[in-house]
Image (tube, grey):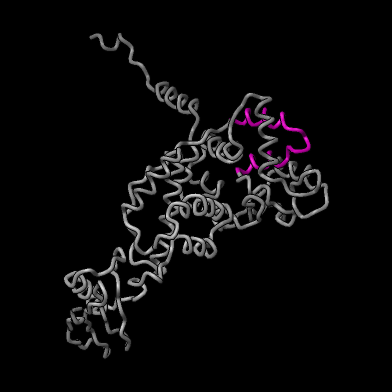
Amino acid sequence: MTPAPTCEHHSPQLLTGGEFMGGSVHFQGSRWVIHIYWQGKRHKIWRDYDSFQPFFTKKRALKYLGILQKQIEDHDFDPRYWKPDSIISVRKYAMAWLDEKEVDYRTWRDYKTDVTKYIIPYFKSADIRHLKARDLKNFMKWLKKKGLAPDTVTHKMSTLKTMLKDAYRDEDIKRVPPFPVLKRKTLTRPDSLTIEQQDQLINAIPERHRPIFELGMALGLRVGEVRAIQKDCLREGKVFIEGAFSDNRLKGTKTGLERSYELTEYEQEILSRARAHLGPFVFVRDDGKPYTNKNLNHIWQEASEKTGITIKLQNAMRHSLGCQMLDAGHDLDLVREQLGHTDIRTTKRYARRSDSTLTAARDGRRAKVIPMREEKWKL
């Protein structure tokens, strides 16, 4: 004879605002079910909050009834978190996050790669609301097993952390699970060139393409900034840096701030060799279109091979000027203004005095010491 269903009730309790907190557990089939009253409706909870496992014992069902009542009392109850048919999968959430994320194109492109090639293939349909620290540790181990470099693993984990922080901000998850300790990217000072080395490289570049490199070096511009200079940016004897290319998309400057430079005679001469063509941009290829990063890096690579001087184009254009200004005796804040840094700590990282300047300073210090003649010590 099948035993009659049993149930255990908890008396309703009036909460602030006229809402009742109550509930009961009922035995149905082979498991227990929680009935909870919330916002005028009775909800049936079949599985637990953590693992969506059924309530096979009354003791377990009563435990989670207490958790439910506490959530309602704290105004923290959401029935979606208790129902397996309302799972917010990592796959679904990550794609929606990509669609809504507002960052520059290059950053968004990196996020897309991390999401589509690593985060979704690993987590798949797992509920983003229930990710735990061990899930993140296992994801990091999985990335390492794929043979990714430590900095690359850190980058993928950082993308996941950014997504989960956004989910917490938007109240889609209740908390961001603890992340494993990430290896910090090693900060190294970039290489730089002397003015003589810059001239060697410029002379190895075909004359037709020299002006864009020359102006970039003269003003210490980012590659994307010098590519984006248009003719209407040249006015009143100045050049106004109003935008930059991110890959091949024209955007605002990296800091979001515009800046201007009063042109020297040398810089005006460079521009006079570059504007004899139709179109809005100052520096263009033979087809009249603006240079791409790929174009400039190809030209730069050929010049490097001819001269034997190897350095990244960004460092040659931008960081070299900061180092040269420091060597010339200019203070760090002036260098910061020239390079357009908003934080002087960035300037300290990218601009440094050359070894020869430091050696000369030490040598000059000793030169000011007047040696005492041995006779003066004799009485």
Q: Vertically, is 83 above or below 309?
A: below
Give the residue at the far bottom of this rendering: 18
Q: Magenta includes 213?
A: yes
**Residue 43 coordinates in the image, percent (x, y):** 31, 81
**Residue 124 coordinates in the image, percent (x, y):** 45, 57
Q: Magenta includes 277?
A: no
User: For this view, does 189 lie left or right of residue 81?
Assistant: right
Question: In the picture, residue 35 is in which quadrant?
Answer: bottom left
**Residue 72 coordinates in the image, percent (x, y):** 26, 79
Residue at the image point whose x is 40% and y is 55% from the top: 161
User: For this view, does 233 lie left or right of residue 12?
Assistant: right
Tell which of 208 and 268 is nearer to you: 208
Residue at the image point whose x is 66% and y is 56% from the top: 250
Which corner quadrant holds the N terminus?
Answer: bottom left
Question: In the picture, residue 186 is in which quadrant?
Answer: top left
Residue at the image point whose x is 72% and y is 54% from the top: 230
Residue at the image point whose x is 26% and y is 75% from the top: 29
Q: Vertically, is 114 above or below 303?
A: below
Which corner quadrant holds the C terminus?
Answer: top left
Most common SS among magenta residues: helix
**Range of magenta residues:** 194-220
